[in-house]
């Protein structure tokens, strides 16, 4: 099996190689020396007793055979005294991962390709680090224990007690305990210097903030206590926000935190930084700017199956090697992961990456894109060294179109808030043409809504205003923008030419199929012009978008509609259905008045107060999250979706077709039909730790 050079391995603490001393041989006692003749008046002295023979030492007992197996790569390090035995590295009760396809074998390197240089957003995150207190079951039906082996919920749904697996260790061998959780909650999440806006509403809604507390019970146990019942907490903890509970090793990060190191500001200045906050974000996770420091700092402790040994930096390749303290085993007792290494290679564009895949240089890529679907299938049919499995989309739509109803432009704000405008723009879209041209015939016309298979499916929300009808579009638009210029283009309420800047992310954004969005947007610009509405595309980077969102400078936005479709996901990712959500740009200009924000007063001046009913919609949603049974959650959430259908916040294009996942033929362990989406962690739900290389 393939092994990795020890020089590339972790800086594991060296264990002194103890040598067993040879047992000393017992010596034969000398014969007693005859006493000289005693004087007649003295009794003879007894001879000195012989020195007792030193018993032969029993040999050291052999170590009992381990009940776990490990990779040959790690076994060599144990043999050399550079690593503790596998039994000492695993927790008392490791998490058991039943292989989804077949039992694997040790060794080999996973070759993963990304577009752009962000290993995190390009897909590396979901491969090498996505470990939560609870995780999704492989079918996305519910959550199950993970880092926490037991979760107890009080009868009223307000108190959650988590018991961590005893003996889990970070990749540097230090214990993972409740102290790490308390550090994240108390010293990071609620630290006003590090996190001025406080915890994200994605896991701590407004209704749960006042009165929330976290308590450490013992090293393995902690409690989260809420002021109200919180029936959907475990859903949230299995997604993106929950991952952060397991990425703040206190023993490492406290040296950069002023509460633990009074010289933290001095350390910051030594590195050319202004203060300890900047230092902490350089050494530790920075929620959006660089959320995964273990991608580029080899000494950063991790709980994932592989740890970085070569960051990508300004180059094109990042390398990861197996974590010897990874806390999962398969059902035969084999410590995971199976593969020794992960190598992530960056490519400039999807076409170059696709060529590498077809040439046999890659094993796996995330988001192959609709534009390359035919390319991959044709190549497979021609005998290229690839396989293709199907993926079931989590999302309710391929594309979502947002008009910022809180725009700081009063003319746009007035128009966007008029429902007739949104209805008219929806009827102007030729969805069948977009499906045929952009999505290669996959899918069907639909608005953004839960899937038909979801218990939250809402027929009106999914199917209203879908008909492509220019006359009907003009009928609704004439109610809002009745006046036109000599060229038939509409004038705004102020009598000036009406025009919208439509923001779209460039191809370096890796959170979706951006090329498909752009291709569809170019078609829609023509559709909108046909009904007299001028729309101009503005393609920008994710970084520029981040800057503009802080000043409310995004009036129209195109994004995926890819979350909140499958299962119960709409109740823990309601971004398309309630105002105030981070990626819900239809309400972006209202957001700091609806959810906690880290905006400065100067920045907040660019935002506008929402109509009173918006706060009522958020309250309605938060009441749904407080329900403690699935039946109650479904009933309450359908009321939220009723309101969403009535308001018609977001325009959708089509239901996604069946997804596809190209892999090399040598990569094994990926089940066919697994769900795909941000909420289940894209390919993390397929358990990369149990993938393996069938050859080489």
Image (tube, rainbow, N blue to C red):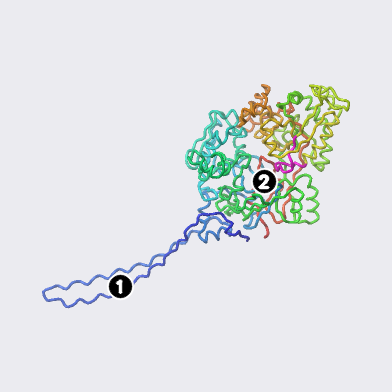
Q: Secondary structure at mark 1?
A: loop
Q: Residues within 10 Å of mark 2 (few under 14, many from 20)?
A: some
Which region of the structure is painted magenta? 503-515
> Could you tell whether 241 is left or right of 499 in the image?
left
Q: Is residue 174 visible?
A: yes
Residue placed under numbered mark 2 in the picture: 118
Of residues 96 and 398, the one drawn nearer to the viewer in this rendering: 398
On the image, the x and y values in percent for residue 126 come to 65, 46
Magenta-span inclusion, residue 195 = no
Q: Pointer 1: residues within 10 angstroms few (<14), some, or many (20+)?
A: few
Q: Is residue 31 above or below residue 526?
A: below
> Is most of the magenta stretch helix, strand or loop?
loop
Q: Which of the image's four quarters has the N terminus?
A: bottom right
Image quarter of residue 681: top right
Residue assigned mark 1: 29
- In this view of the protein, can residue 418 be seen by the observer? no
**In the image, farthest residue toward the left:** 41
Query: Which comes before the other along the chain, label 2 or label 1?
Result: 1
Which of 484/269 is in front? 269
Q: Position of residue 361 (x, y in %)?
A: 72, 56
Relative image position of residue 116 (x, y in whole percent): 70, 46
């Amino acid at each position: 099996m393939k092994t990795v050079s020890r020089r590339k391995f972790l800086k594991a603490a060296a264990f002194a190689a103890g040598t067993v001393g040879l047992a000393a041989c017992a010596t034969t006692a000398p014969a007693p020396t005859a006493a000289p003749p005693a004087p007649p008046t003295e009794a003879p002295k007894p001879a000195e007793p012989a020195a007792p023979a030193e018993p032969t030492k029993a040999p050291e007992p052999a170590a009992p055979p381990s009940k776990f197996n490990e990779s040959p790569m790690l076994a060599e390090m144990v043999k050399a005294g550079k690593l503790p035995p596998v039994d000492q590295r695993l927790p008392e009760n490791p998490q058991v991962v039943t292989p989804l396809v077949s039992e694997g074998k040790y060794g080999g390197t996973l070759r993963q390709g990304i577009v752009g240089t962000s290993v995190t957003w390009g897909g590396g995150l979901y491969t090498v680090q996505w470990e939560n207190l609870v995780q999704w079951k492989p079918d996305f039906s519910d959550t199950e224990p993970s880092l926490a082996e037991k979760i107890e919920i009080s009868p009223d749904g307000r108190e959650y007690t988590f018991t961590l697996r005893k003996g889990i260790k970070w990749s540097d061998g230090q214990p993972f305990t409740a102290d790490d959780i308390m550090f994240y909650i108390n010293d990071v999440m609620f630290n006003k210097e590090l996190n001025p806006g406080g915890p994200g509403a994605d896991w701590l809604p407004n209704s749960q903030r006042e009165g929330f507390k976290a308590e450490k019970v013992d090293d393995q146990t902690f409690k989260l206590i809420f002021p109200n019942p919180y029936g959907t907490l475990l859903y949230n903890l299995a997604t993106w926000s929950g991952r952060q509970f397991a990425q703040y090793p206190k023993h490492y990060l406290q040296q950069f935190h002023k509460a633990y190191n009074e010289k933290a500001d001095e350390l910051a200045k030594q590195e050319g930084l202004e203060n300890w906050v900047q230092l902490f974000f350089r050494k530790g996770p920075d929620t959006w700017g660089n959320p995964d420091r273990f991608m580029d700092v080899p000494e950063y402790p991790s709980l994932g199956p592989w740890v970085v040994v070569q960051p990508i930096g300004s180059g094109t390749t990042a390398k990861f090697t197996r974590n010897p303290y990874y806390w999962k085993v398969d059902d035969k007792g084999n410590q995971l992961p199976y593969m020794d290494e992960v190598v992530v290679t960056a490519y400039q564009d999807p076409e170059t990456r696709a060529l590498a895949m077809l040439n046999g240089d890659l094993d796996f890529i995330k988001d192959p894109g609709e534009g390359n679907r035919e390319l991959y299938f044709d190549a497979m049919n021609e005998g290229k060294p690839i396989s293709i499995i199907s993926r079931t989309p989590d999302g309710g739509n391929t594309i979502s179109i947002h008009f910022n109803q809180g725009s700081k432009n009063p003319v746009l704000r007035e128009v966007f808030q008029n429902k007739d405008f949104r209805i008219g723009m929806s009827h102007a879209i030729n969805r069948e043409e977009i499906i045929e041209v952009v999505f290669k015939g996959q899918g069907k016309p639909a608005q953004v809504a839960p899937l038909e298979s979801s218990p939250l499916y809402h027929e009106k929300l999914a199917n209203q205003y879908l008909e492509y009808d220019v006359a009907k579009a003009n009928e609704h638009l004439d109610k809002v923008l009745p006046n036109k210029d000599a060229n038939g283009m509409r004038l705004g309420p102020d009598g000036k030419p009406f025009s919208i800047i439509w923001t779209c992310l460039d191809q370096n954004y890796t959170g979706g199929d951006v090329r498909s969005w752009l291709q569809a947007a170019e078609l829609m610009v023509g559709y909108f012009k046909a009904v007299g509405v001028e729309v101009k595309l503005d393609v920008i980077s994710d970084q520029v978008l981040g800057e503009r969102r802080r000043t409310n400078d995004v009036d129209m936005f195109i994004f995926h509609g890819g979350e909140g479709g499958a299962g119960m996901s709409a109740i823990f990712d309601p971004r398309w259905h309630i105002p105030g959500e981070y990626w819900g740009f239809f309400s972006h200009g209202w957001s700091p008045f609806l959810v906690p924000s880290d905006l400065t007063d100067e920045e907040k001046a660019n935002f506008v107060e929402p109509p009173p009913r918006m706060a009522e919609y958020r309250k309605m949603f938060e009441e749904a999250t407080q329900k403690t049974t699935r039946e109650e959650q479904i009933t309450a959430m359908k009321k939220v979706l009723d309101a969403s259908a009535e308001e018609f916040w977001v325009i959708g294009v089509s239901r996604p077709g069946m997804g596809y996942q190209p892999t090399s033929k040598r990569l094994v362990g990926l089940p066919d039909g697994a769900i795909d989406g941000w909420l289940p962690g894209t390919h993390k739900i397929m358990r990369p730790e149990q993938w393996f290389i069938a050859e080489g």
